[in-house]
């Protein structure tokens, strides 16, 4: 007869061995599951990375398309100082006219600006500094915010040839500084009173990087044209009207009343009113 003690020991050993086998199988199964889960996670990460890369490539392609998309180029103009006409620098419409209004802001500048704004055309308003009281400053600020070019027409509208060098510099520089305080920009264009440019003012133009601008024709100070009807007629049918014509007008009631007819008449003849902001300072 076998010893019961050894039988008991044998049974205990057998039980421990089975538990170890089960544990090993469980551990193997757990490891297999972790490996499979890790493989799935890696595959998902790769898919996410591929997706992110795809989105990045799509974004890069969109940016590249925007960067390479053709942008409409603006045609720029210059002032021909031989005859004061406006001419295209490269390719551009030659059949243009420029509208300029002197002696702003007297009494009708804002009214004239609103008319032009309604018609969808631009102009240069040349300012006299002695008109810049508080109300005048507000008007110039309004014109600037409406998109109109603001030019320098001196502080006091003198004949510059009759002034000293110091006085001439004051007439231009003082007004430049005043206009900068109002608009935040220095004027790009200078119109000499009576069209009298001097050596001093010419040197100042280079120093201040401004452009001189006289005119091709104007009539609203002549006795025969102090009425809207004859003024509109002569401005549209003047013998001086040609491609690039630089039209001089003033802040006057009869000019303000004639302005809409002048613009329509010029456009009916095929002329485009050039935007002064396209005129480069050279």
Image: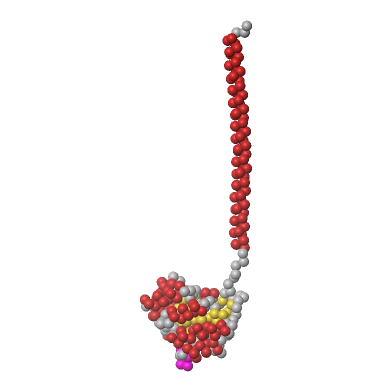
Residue at the front extreme? 1
Q: Quadrant of the N terminus?
A: top right
List x then y, in percent, for residue 183: 43, 72
Relative vertical location of residue 218 with respect to residue 40 in this rendering, above or below: below
Identify the residue at horizontal 60%, vertical 25% (top origin).
22
Colour scheme:
secondary structure
Can you give x and y, in whole percent of width and height, for residue 229 in the image? 49, 90
Q: Position of residue 97 (x, y in %)?
A: 55, 81
241 relative position to 199: left or right = right
Q: How many marks?
A: 0
Q: Please report the residue visible at 37 percent of the width from the left and 76 percent of the height from the top.
A: 134
Residue 214 image offset from top left, x and y in percent: 50, 83
Residue 16 occupies quadrant: top right
The answer to whether residue 157 of the structure is visible from this angle is yes
The furthest residue to the bottom: 224
Residues 253 and 173: in front is 253
Q: Which residues are magenta?
A: 221-225
Specify whether residue 45 is painted magenta: no
Q: Hey, which residue is sitting farthest top in the picture? A: 1
14 relative to 248 in the view: left or right: right
Q: Nearer the viewer, residue 2 or 41?
A: 2
> Can residue 198 be seen in the rendering of this structure?
no
Q: Residue at x 49, y 84 (%)?
A: 259
Position of residue 141 in the picture relative to residue 36 (left or right)? left
Quarter of the image for the C terminus: give it.
bottom right
Task: Pick out the residue farthest to the left.
Answer: 134
Q: Residue at x 59, y 56 (%)?
A: 59
Magenta segment, prevailing SS (helix, strand or loop): helix
């Amino acid at each position: 007869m076998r010893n019961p003690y050894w039988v008991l020991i044998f049974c205990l050993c057998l039980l421990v061995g089975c538990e170890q086998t089960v544990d090993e199988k469980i551990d193997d199964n757990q490891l297999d599951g972790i490996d499979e889960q890790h493989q799935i996670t890696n595959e998902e990460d790769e898919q996410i990375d591929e997706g992110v890369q795809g989105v990045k490539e799509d974004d890069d392609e969109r940016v590249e398309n925007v960067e390479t998309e053709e942008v409409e180029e603006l045609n720029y103009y210059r002032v021909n100082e031989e005859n004061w006409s406006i001419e295209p620098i490269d390719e551009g419409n030659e059949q243009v006219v420029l509208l300029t209004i002197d002696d702003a802001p007297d009494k009708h500048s804002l009214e004239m600006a609103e008319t032009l704004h309604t018609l969808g055309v631009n102009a240069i308003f040349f300012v006299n500094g002695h008109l810049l009281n508080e109300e005048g400053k507000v008007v110039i600020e309004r014109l600037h915010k409406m998109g109109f070019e603001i030019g320098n027409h001196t502080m006091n509208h003198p004949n510059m040839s009759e002034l000293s060098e110091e006085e001439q510099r004051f007439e231009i520089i003082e007004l430049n500084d005043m206009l900068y305080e109002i608009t935040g920009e220095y004027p790009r264009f200078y119109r000499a009173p009576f069209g009298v440019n001097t050596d001093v003012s010419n040197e100042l133009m280079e120093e201040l990087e401004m452009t001189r601008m006289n005119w091709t024709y104007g009539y609203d100070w002549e006795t025969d044209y102090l009425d809207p009807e004859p003024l509109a007629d002569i401005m549209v049918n003047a013998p001086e009207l040609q491609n690039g014509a630089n039209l001089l007008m003033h802040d006057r009631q009869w000019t303000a009343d004639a302005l809409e007819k002048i613009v329509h008449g010029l456009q009916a003849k095929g002329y485009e009113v050039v935007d002064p902001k396209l005129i480069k300072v050279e």
